[in-house]
Image: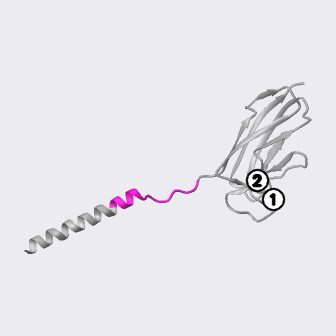
Amino acid sequence: MIKAWTLQKSIFLALVLLLLALSIACHPEPVAPQEARILIIDPAAESVIDTATVTIKTFVERFNLVDKTGQPNSPGEGHIVYYKDVTPPLGQGESALTAEGSYIISTKTSETWDNLQPGEHTFWVQLVNNDNTSLLPPAAVRVYVTVKE
């Protein structure tokens, strides 16, 4: 009778351990949220444009575009800064704004630059916090465009 009881306890313990192992396998550690991302979908890299107007179209992932410029930061929300012919600041806690006229603050996924001079131009887009500081890590991308004469 004692052997039967010991066998039952062993089987019970084995089942508990099996269930615990299955529970851990089915519920792994939580995955950290993926970082915000922005892409330029138009114009294509190294495009040649026949007009003095260029519209930059973007695609944004894992980030909510909100009109809260100057308000306190909230994780996962902010706006886009579009840049023309400047390299944006990307440092943590640093203002992402450049010289007046070289950027547009927007919550839209496309913005247009008019009256461009013929020649090569660099356009950047960057996702930023409500207070216009860069995300950590930064979410920025650029495209080179040539405007024909």
Q: Residue at (14%, 68%) from the top-left corner?
A: 7
Q: Crowding near pointer 1: few (<14 within 10 Å), some, many (20+)?
A: some
Magenta stretch, residue numbers:
21-33
Q: Residue at (19%, 68%) from the top-left corner?
A: 10
Q: Residue at (80%, 45%) from the top-left corner?
A: 82
Task: Give the CA separation, mark 2 to mark 1.
Answer: 8 Å
For the residue pair 90 and 12, the one nearer the viewer reads as 12
Q: Earlier in the sequence, mark 2 or mark 1?
A: 1
Q: Residue at (77%, 59%) from the top-left corner?
A: 130
Does 86 appear above or below 132? Answer: above
Badge 1 amino acid: Thr
Which numbered tag is attached to residue 69? 1
**Residue position marked by numbered label 2 in the rendering:** 79
Does 32 appear above or below 60? Answer: below
Toward the bottom, the furthest residue is 2
SS type, badge 1? loop
Dots 2 and 1: beta carbons under 8 Å? Answer: yes
Q: Is residue 24 magenta?
A: yes
Does 92 appear above or below 87? Answer: below
